[in-house]
Image (spheres, grey):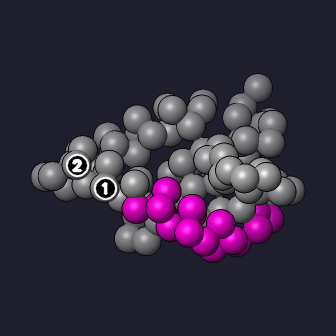
Amino acid sequence: MSCASDLRWFKTYYIKAFPEGKAAAETRFAAVQELLKANPSIGHPSEKIEGVREHRVLHTPFNFLYRVVEDRIEILRVLDMRSDWIGDDDETGETN
């Protein structure tokens, strides 16, 4: 899985959970992006992946996994924390 497939699931979750679905997901994602830009250290250091931070999206089951690299923030995954995402994985949580 990749961040792109995670985002598809994020939008699908919102469409199923809320009548306004897609717009709500896009608004929530944009808000998290702005929050991370303004406060790159807002997420807590991951206990599972060195150099990665985790930011929980309030009132949802989602965590953004990201890292700060030089002058940018790389969003690695948008994870539904109701599932087990650690297994045989690389630094982004992808299963090999």
Can see residue 21? yes
User: Which residue: 65% across, 66% down?
Assistant: 40
- Tell me which segment is drawn in magenta: 31-47
Dot 2: few (<14), some (14–19), or many (≥20) neighbours within 10 Å? some
Q: Disc 1 marks which residue?
A: 27
- Name the residue: 60% across, 32% down: 2
Kindly state the secondary structure of the residue where label 1 is placed.
helix
Answer with left or right where residue 52 lies relative to residue 62: right
Which kind of residue does numbered mark 1 sit on?
Thr
Q: Are marks 1 and 2 in contact (CB under 8 Å)?
A: yes
> Residue 23's mark?
2
Front in this rendered view, residue 39 or 89: 39
Image quadrant containing the N terminus = top right
Q: Is residue 90 above or below residue 52?
A: above
Q: Amino acid at mark 2?
A: Ala
Q: Is residue 95 magenta?
A: no
Question: For the view shown, which residue lies furthest in the right direction?
Answer: 50
Rendered position, 47 above or below 90 = below
Name the residue located 49 percent from the left edge and 32 percent from the top edge.
5
On the image, the x and y values in percent for residue 32 come to 47, 61
**Residue 81 location, quadrant:** bottom right
Whole-Å distance between the Cαs marked 1 and 2? 6 Å
